[in-house]
Amino acid sequence: MAKELKRASLVRRLCAYAIDYLIVVILVSLISAPFIDAKKIDKLQNESTEVIEKYQKGEITPDEYLERYSSVYYSLSRSTGVMTFITIIIYIVYFVVFQLYNKGQTFGKKLMKIKVVALDGDLSMNQMIFRAFIVNMILLNIINFALITFAPKGIYTGVSATLSMIQYIIMFISVILATTKEGRTIHDRIAHTRVVSAK
């Protein structure tokens, strides 16, 4: 049955993702607000901007830039660790549990009239977990949170940069795959799912 359904277009998938991302950002911001030091985060963000500007103006060397920026970035990441943890929880609840029990649709997918379906049979919790761990970067966020909590600055900044690169590569490949005839991205192939137009 799922194979007879029309493939969802890349534009509709991207629009749905943007809507869902906005919803998640708002939820995370509201829930984490009481637990973070906004003034400290603003100060660190300003320091980060200042370091970048000084480097662009040639006031500091590349080595000084890397040292100072990685230090600020590490401090900022530790200061927003609770936000990372809340993000992981919200992602699991929204993209795994809610989407599964809403027949393969998030609010974004519902607005764009698309849905996730299994290649064979009904969607399972395992399929939604595999999808979310990849497309919504839950696995990378979990690794990142563990690094923020336990790893020293040197290890954190290096691994975090690598994880970000992996994230962008996965997203790029998924966008390319979404334009093919099957329209099945990396997470679709791993989870044995498709995103199709919802009737």
Image (cartoon, rainbow, N blue to C red):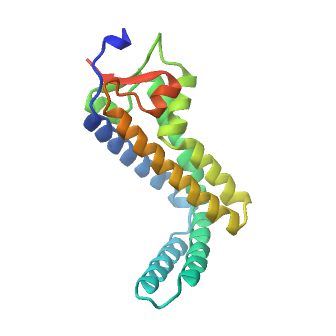
Quadrant in which residue 73 is drawn:
bottom right
The correct choice, above or below, for 92 with respect to 156 in the image is above
Q: Position of residue 59 (x, y in %)?
A: 47, 91
Which residue of the protein is positioned furthest toward the bottom in this rendering?
59
| Residue depicted at 42% across the width and 32% down the height | 185
- Residue 137 position within the rendered picture, expressed as x and y whole percent measured from the top left: 52, 44
Q: Which of 183 and 38 is in front in this view?
A: 183
Residue beneath the point at 36% across and 13% down:
3
Q: Is residue 146 left or right of residue 113?
A: right
Q: In this view, does 59 lie above or below 109?
A: below
* Residue 61, placed above or below residue 189: below
Q: In this view, does 85 lie to the left or right of 53?
A: right
Tally of numbered tags = 0
Q: Picture quarter containing residue 112?
A: top left
Q: Which residue is drawn at 48% across and 26% down?
A: 189
The quarter holding residue 176 reads: top left
Q: Nearer the viewer, residue 95 or 143?
A: 143
19 vs 165, left or right, is left
Q: Which image quarter is the N terminus in?
A: top left
* Residue ID at (33%, 36%): 108
For the C terminus, which image quadrant?
A: top left
**Looking at the picture, how far across and down is residue 124, in whole percent?**
53, 19
Q: Position of residue 181 (x, y in %)?
A: 31, 25
